[in-house]
């Protein structure tokens, strides 16, 4: 007997479209049995496949209506597909080097911030630039569109987390 009876979902809802695509992709990933599932390299590869599947499923669920979804799909399509053997220790070292470099830059920079006043008198500055780095495709947006896309992107990420949590709850003992 099934321990979880999902409620009826609207097939045109974002959650339903994402869940359907993501579960289909997860079953394909699961069908590709690794030779040794406990090696750090194989765990990292599976992590990357699942992350890409979640991102791609969400972007396709939104369709091409949003700038962030088009930017994310473009990024996923143009990424290198070659199966390079990358050691996990190399990845960790490069992350640590970036973190150290970022800390050094923060120490060297002064705390002055450039601010700009918009047409309606609202002051924005470094925060908008930081937001542009977080939202896919945000680099080329004006502030109004950036905030609109950010709100929608957060809504979609929340939906993604909720669906993934339900999947994890379903399969947990």
Image (cartoon, rainbow, N blue to C red):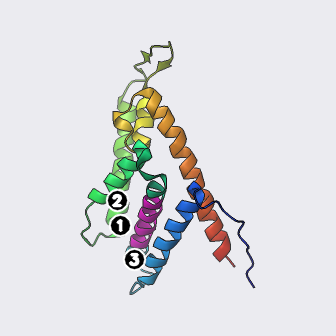
Q: Residues within 10 Å of mark 1 (few under 14, many from 20)?
A: few
Residue at image point 43% right, 74% down: 43
Residue at image point 48% right, 52% down: 62
Q: Which residue is mark 2?
A: 93
Label 3 element class: helix
Residue 11 or residue 106, whichever sits in front: 11
Label 2 element class: helix
Quadrant that contains the N terminus: bottom right
Bounds of the magenta segment: 44-57
Q: Which residue is mark 1?
A: 89
Q: CA distance from mark 3 to mark 1?
A: 13 Å
Which callout, 2 or 3, points to the residue nearer the camera? 3
- Kindly identify which numbered label has been placed on residue 106: none
Look at the numbered discs 2 and 3 and tell me whether their residues touch, using CB distance below 8 Å.
no
Q: Is residue 145 above or below residue 55?
A: above
Which comes sooner in the sequence, label 3 or label 1? 3
Is any part of residue 127 visible from this angle?
no
In this rendering, would 148 be left or right of 2? left
In this rendering, would 142 be left or right of 84? right
Which callout, 3 or 1, points to the residue nearer the camera? 3
Q: Please identify the quarter of the rendering in which residue 42 is found.
A: bottom left
Look at the numbered discs 1 and 2 and tell me whether their residues touch, using CB distance below 8 Å.
yes
Residue 170 or residue 110, whichever sits in front: 170
Q: Residues within 10 Å of mark 3 (few under 14, many from 20)?
A: some
Q: Which residue is mark 3?
A: 42
Tally of numbered discs: 3
Residue 98, percent from left and from top: 34, 49
In this rendering, would 49 be left or right of 18? left
Residue 47 or residue 96, whichever sits in front: 47
């Amino acid at each position: 007997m099934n321990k979880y009876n999902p409620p009826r979902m609207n097939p045109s809802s974002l959650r339903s479209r994402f869940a359907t695509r993501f579960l289909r992709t997860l079953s394909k990933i699961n069908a590709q049995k690794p030779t040794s599932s406990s090696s750090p390299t194989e765990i990292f590869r599976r992590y990357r496949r699942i992350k890409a599947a979640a991102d791609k499923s969400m972007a396709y669920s939104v369709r091409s209506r949003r700038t962030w979804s088009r930017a994310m799909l473009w990024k996923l399509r143009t990424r290198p597909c070659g199966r390079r053997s990358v050691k996990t220790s190399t990845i960790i070292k490069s992350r640590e080097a970036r973190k150290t470099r970022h800390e050094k830059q923060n120490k060297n920079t002064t705390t002055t911030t450039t601010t700009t006043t918009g047409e309606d008198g609202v002051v924005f500055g470094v925060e908008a630039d930081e937001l542009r780095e977080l939202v896919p495709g945000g680099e080329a947006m004006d502030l109004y569109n950036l905030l609109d896309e950010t709100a929608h992107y957060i809504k979609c990420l929340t939906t993604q987390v909720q669906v993934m949590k339900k999947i994890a709850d379903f399969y947990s003992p």
